[in-house]
Image (tube, helix red, strand yellow):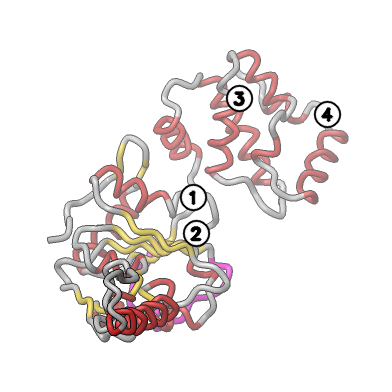
Amino acid sequence: MANKEFWTGSDKYLCDRDLAQSFHIARTLGMPLLIEGEPGTGKTELPIQYAADQNLELFVYPTGSKSNVEQFVARFDHVKYLRDSQIEILNSQREEKGLESKLSTGGRNPENLADYVAMGPAAKAYSKPNSVLLIDEIDKAPREFPNDLLYALSHRKFIMPESGETIEVSENDMPAIIITSNREQELPTAFKGRCIYHYIHFPGEDTMREIIAKHYPKVSNQIVDVAMDVFYHLRKIGLERAPTTRELLNWLKYVKTFSTSEAIDKIQKLEGIGALIKTQTDLERVQKQILSNPTDFQKRSTPN
């Protein structure tokens, strides 16, 4: 039976009440949880941290422009099947000639088509109740990919290629399926209808402090204060790509290696800004603002 306990996060992951509720509903109903939100808000970390905290097996499918159901579910290895079939013929010929040695197929039998089916993350997760399946950034996949998943999500089963074997799971034993999207393209309505939906809003300052405390409980409050001040200022000035939670954590990981006074000095000088700013246009904009208002970031990053 799949794990249906209400999960509120771990010592490494802050799962707010609304997200925890959506995740619980999805697991209770045996439906996927579709999480949307801007990059860096912890969508992908949810299944990773949940699996680690609950000691569950995690299967991951990172989607891309060439994603297809064959990669996701299972594929039939035609090359290996053809080679083994030829080996069987050769072995028969060798036997007719009285040769005792045989060529090996690695234990595979061409008469058993299942030997040549390579299971993907979906088939593996469906075969293992109480596992976790992450379909990451599905909005990057071709539009037909989510449409091709409708049958499997509705009927909770996959039919293996060539062999015809069916891998089926009950509603009660469905793996915890989390699907993430950065909303680069709109997903099909029918696909969304098969999911429980949740949108992760960008965390406010209080929540951000809790997130930081989960990752770096020993970092100085002064460092956190000045770093967050600069961080939220950068998010408000209209950058092409505003810095995200993940990037703030990376920046803090760097500056916290120094003493408090050194770290604050580095924040004031925006040292390591490449951890936060990810485009040339944004970098030039920040540099221009510093030149026109040289004390702006120093004022923002001066502890009270």
Q: Residue at x 33, y 77 (%)?
A: 194
* Residue annotated with mark 2: 37
Q: Is residue 294 left or right of residue 103?
A: right
User: Mark 3 Cα within 10 Å, few/some/many (few <14, many 20+)?
Assistant: many
Q: Is residue 280 magenta?
A: no
Judge by depth and name the residue closer to the eye, 187 or 236.
Answer: 187
Answer whether residue 159 is visible to the viewer in this image.
Answer: no
What amino acid type should be assigned to the residue bearing mark 2?
A: Gly
Q: Residue 36 location, x and y as percent?
A: 46, 62
* Residue annotated with mark 1: 41
* Res. 118 image quadrant: bottom left
Q: Up-down: is 224 above or below 247?
A: above
Q: CA distance from mark 2 to mark 3?
A: 27 Å
Which mark identifies residue 255? 3
Q: Earlier in the sequence, mark 2 or mark 4?
A: 2
Q: Are marks 2 and 4 in contact (CB under 8 Å)?
A: no
Q: Residue at x 60, y 30 (%)?
A: 227
What amino acid type should be assigned to the residue bearing mark 1?
A: Thr
Q: Are marks 4 and 3 in contact (CB under 8 Å)?
A: no
Q: Is residue 184 magenta?
A: yes
